[in-house]
Amino acid sequence: MVGPSSQISKFLLTLLFLLIIFFIWMDVNLYIRIQDYPIRDNEIRLLNGSTMLKPTLPATQSYATSAVPRRQQELFAARYEDVAWVSCDLNPLCDVTVKAMMLDQTNHYLFAPMATIADNLAGFSKGDLITPNMISFFHVFVAIASGKMIASDSLGYRRIGVVLFQFRTFLDDLDGHVARAKKHIRGERSDIGSAGYYIDGICDGLGCIALMIGVFIFLKNNPPRRGYTQLQSIIPVSESKSSESGVIYKVKVTTKKVVRKVLCYSGILLLSSTGWNRYIAIYQDLLEREDVTPVQFLHQESVFRSTGFFFVCWLWRMFNVHALLHFLLLSIFCDKLWEYLRMIQYAGFVTLLVIISVAEMHLLGVQNFIYKSLTGNNTSL
């Protein structure tokens, strides 16, 4: 490292603290924006009495007939972009989507605006020279370079590897932004089923594999052992005692234990990625589809504004695969990799299973509320 390590540590700690405060502040503003302003343009047309969304319902559906006047009284006709301080090109709060609400704070509040700025400067989405798939393929090589540096014995090189992998994450945001801009899609959305969706997923998976290989090589070459002062507290309790001297020798961490920790974390990443993508796809179909009746539309908006849905999304914000990668990279940067892997080895699986259970129960209620209770059938999505 360059410069006094204590001063740099204080600066980085302060920066991390300010970043956390910024993320909390933005989350609060996101909740306020959802509650106080229309989420989709269709709401404004409904408030203005558009015939397309004006319901004509039987008298038996009392909830539906009372819902429209109540919503007209509660919602503002002004759009959020009319009152926002920052242009909606850069403001991550303008376009509220399911994926945006479930995206981790670093990607949503930092890398997404940065990707917009980069695209505005370079004009990737306005030409055909650089395609989203090309950006996806390129960030695989960035991830490989990052994994190689993270495998290094030097803390300085490992920190450079962390920065490189975060650059890869930015490129992952950039390819998504360029793909959506080319298709004139506003906001964060997964174009599920398209070739780009699968290519991006494969490239993301290869990047994660490169990172975990780098983590394994580093721990294999630098196992916690007696004599490493900073790692003494995490050495297993396994001990041997010399009958002659009475001295206790602590046994170093074996390669088998390193493999176990790395495989466990890889499993956590896989479980998180599978669950996160599944719930994005299902909630996106439930809450953003447009071929619905006016009353179903109102129910969609009601779910979007509910505290329960915001809570489920916030849980996935904190524990989706991108957030877990950020935590891993932070532990590498702080030279606390082994401690982090030990802490989350089993707790990570338990936490994700709890989140999946909460999301599943909420999902069943949402599907029932929007569709089954209105249509009177058992159609599932």
Image (cartoon, rainbow, N blue to C red):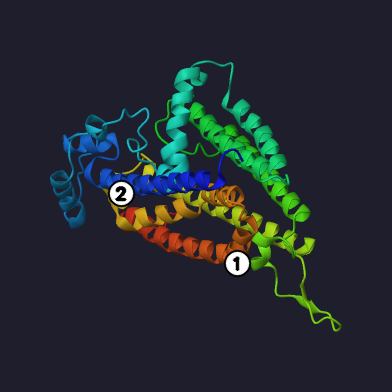
Q: Residue at x 56, y 16 (%)?
A: 128
x, y percent for residue 135: 60, 28
Q: Nearer the viewer, residue 322 or 197?
A: 322
- Of the residues shown, which amino acid type is indicated by label 1? Tyr
Residue depicted at x 59% and y 35%: 168
Label 2 neighbourhood size at 10 Å, few (<14), some (14-19), many (20+)?
A: few
Question: Can residue 359 be seen by looking at this rendering?
Answer: yes
Q: Residues within 10 Å of mark 1 (few under 14, many from 20)?
A: some
**In the image, 48: left or right of 248?**
left
Task: Residue 311: name its quadrant.
Answer: bottom left
User: Quadrant of the rendered structure where residue 4 is?
Assistant: top right
* Residue 366 in the image, given as x and y percentages of width and height: 36, 56
Q: CA distance from mark 2 to mark 1?
A: 31 Å
Q: Return the residue at label 1.
A: 346
Which residue is nearer to you in this view: 246 or 326?
Answer: 246
Percent x, y for residue 82?
23, 30
Q: Quadrant of the N terminus?
A: top right
| Secondary structure category for the residue under label 2 | helix
Nearer-the-camera pick, 203 or 340: 340
- Mark number for residue 28? 2
Q: Is residue 213 left or right of residue 274?
A: right
